[in-house]
Image (spheres, rainbow, N blue to C red):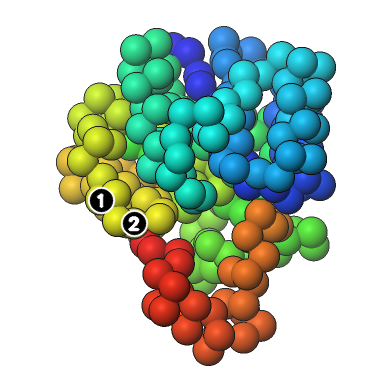
């Protein structure tokens, strides 16, 4: 089975380039294709992504060419990626632009998605630069067991694979367009449909949270202001 890898991008040039280069430095034997979705980044970022796409060979989709809807456009990205993965008989791996994978991350995630029973979604645990598990998997710090963990908690889309079987069962056209992010809902939908979700705690990836949307750092530095923006400006709807 093939593998489709996607990265949604909203500026954050430094981490985005690290994300892309880490993917191309990976040791991958499965047949894969890689698409970067540029979600109304600055002209400077768009120029750099265009250059990188020619240098490395990934497909660059500038969402400004196909929609006038303001960023974030995660719904459009998910719907487009699902259609393409279903048509190609592929698994879908989301690696966000603030995540840096290791050389073996992608291949091992793909193998786990094929070997484990009834997989709907499978995610690599995220850590900070010191190797300590960080947001959004802080709950994993409390787990007594480590390794491959079946979980009913949400899997973030930081570095997460959605199997072809699950993609065939749930149509993303049914997702609520009023929301901004869909990882919580889709995680629960996977288990609701009888699939199993797994967190790989021994396959960590580096996560530099919210590098593409700095205002979300307020969640940790100024929670009052974060929630004021969230509700008054209808930001970050989950």
- Please report the residue visible at 67 percent of the width from the left and 19 percent of the height from the top: 58
**Residue 112, image x, y percentages:** 48, 30
Secondary structure beneath label 2: loop
Q: Is residue 225 visible?
A: yes
- Please report the residue visible at 80 percent of the width from the left and 62 percent of the height from the top: 130
The N terminus: image quadrant: top left
**Residue 66, image x, y percentages:** 46, 29
Crowd rating for badge 2 (residues with CA inside 10 Å; few <14, some 14–19, many 20+): some
Residue placed furthest toward the left: 193
Q: Is residue 209 visible?
A: no
Using the rendered view, name the quadrant where residue 96 is placed. top right
| Disc number placed over residue 179 in the picture, else none | 2
Depth check: 234 or 36 in front?
234
| Disc number placed over residue 57 in the picture, else none | none
The C terminus: image quadrant: bottom left
Q: Name the residue beneath numbered marker 1.
A: 176
Depth check: 145 or 130 in front?
130
Give the Cα distance between marks 2 and 1. Answer: 6 Å
Crowd rating for badge 1 (residues with CA inside 10 Å; few <14, some 14–19, many 20+): few
> In this picture, is 174 found above or below 55?
below
- Please report the residue visible at 25 percent of the width from the left and 36 percent of the height from the top: 173
Secondary structure beneath label 1: loop
Compared across the picture, whether 78 is left or right of 29 comes to left
Compared across the picture, whether 81 is left or right of 131 comes to left
Dot 2 and dot 1 residues touching (CB under 8 Å): yes
Using the rendered view, name the quadrant where residue 83 is placed. top left
> In this picture, is 228 found above or below 81?
below
**Residue 143, image x, y percentages:** 49, 65
């Amino acid at each position: 089975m093939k593998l489709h890898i996607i990265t949604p991008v909203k500026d954050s040039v430094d981490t985005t380039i690290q994300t892309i280069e880490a993917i191309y430095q990976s040791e991958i034997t499965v047949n894969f294709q890689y698409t970067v979705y540029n979600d109304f980044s600055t002209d400077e970022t768009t120029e750099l992504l265009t250059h990188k796409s020619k240098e490395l060979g990934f497909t660059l989709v500038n969402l400004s060419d196909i929609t006038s809807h303001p960023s974030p456009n995660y719904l459009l990205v998910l719907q487009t990626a699902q259609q393409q993965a279903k048509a190609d008989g592929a698994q879908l791996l989301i690696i966000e632009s603030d995540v840096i994978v290791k050389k073996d991350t992608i291949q091992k995630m793909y193998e786990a998605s094929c070997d484990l029973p009834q997989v709907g979604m499978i995610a690599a645990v995220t850590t900070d630069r010191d190797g300590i598990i960080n947001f959004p998997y802080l709950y994993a710090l409390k787990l007594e067991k480590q390794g491959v963990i079946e979980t009913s908690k949400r899997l973030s889309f930081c570095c997460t694979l959605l199997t072809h079987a699950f993609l065939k069962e749930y149509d993303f056209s049914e997702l609520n367009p009023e929301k901004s992010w869909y990882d919580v809902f889709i995680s629960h939908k996977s288990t609701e449909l009888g699939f199993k979700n797994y967190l790989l705690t021994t396959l960590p990836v580096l996560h530099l949270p919210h590098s593409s949307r700095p205002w979300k750092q307020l969640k940790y530095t100024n929670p009052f202001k974060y929630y004021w923006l969230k509700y008054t400006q209808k930001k970050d709807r989950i």
